[in-house]
Image (cartoon, rainbow, N blue to C red):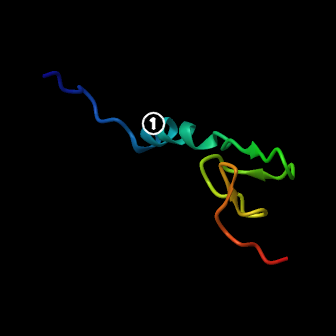
């Protein structure tokens, strides 16, 4: 198996890894209330998940 001829610097490695952290996470919009929440998670404002009430929210 091939081996690198030179050591890869810390700066070069960190530049490559750092490019992945700038992606903005996706948000879904609740069709009923219009609030934003992360997909595949319970909506913290309404307590709904996939059309079902899973958490009771006190207002």
User: Horizontal and vertical percent for residue 30?
Assistant: 79, 47
Give the vertical position of 56 relative to 38 (above or below): below
User: Horizontal and vertical percent for residue 5?
Assistant: 23, 25
Q: Residues within 10 Å of mark 1 (few under 14, many from 20)?
A: few
Residue farthest bottom in this picture: 58
Q: Is residue 31 left or right of residue 8?
A: right
Give the vertical position of 33 relative to 31 (above or below): below
Residue farthest front in this picture: 52
Q: Which residue: 48% across, 40% down?
A: 17
Q: Nearer the viewer, residue 5 or 56?
A: 56
User: Horizontal and vertical percent for residue 13?
Assistant: 42, 39
Q: Is residue 4 left or right of residue 53?
A: left
Q: Nearer the viewer, residue 19 or 51?
A: 51
Give the vertical position of 9 relative to 54 (above or below): above
Q: Which residue: 54% across, 38% down?
A: 20
Residue farthest top in this picture: 2
Please identify the quadrant where the N terminus is shown: top left
Q: Which residue: 62% across, 54% down?
A: 41
Q: Is residue 43 left or right of residue 13?
A: right
User: Horizontal and vertical percent for residue 49?
Assistant: 65, 54
Give the vertical position of 50 relative to 53 (above or below): above
SS assignment at label 1: helix
Please identify the quadrant where the C terminus is shown: bottom right
Please give the residue where the numbered disc 1 appears in the rendered image: 12
């Amino acid at each position: 198996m091939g081996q690198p001829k030179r050591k890869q610097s810390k700066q070069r490695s960190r530049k490559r890894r750092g490019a992945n952290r700038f992606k903005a996470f996706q948000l879904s919009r609740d069709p009923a209330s219009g609030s934003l929440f992360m997909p595949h998670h319970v909506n913290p404002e309404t307590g709904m998940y996939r059309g079902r009430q899973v958490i009771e929210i006190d207002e």
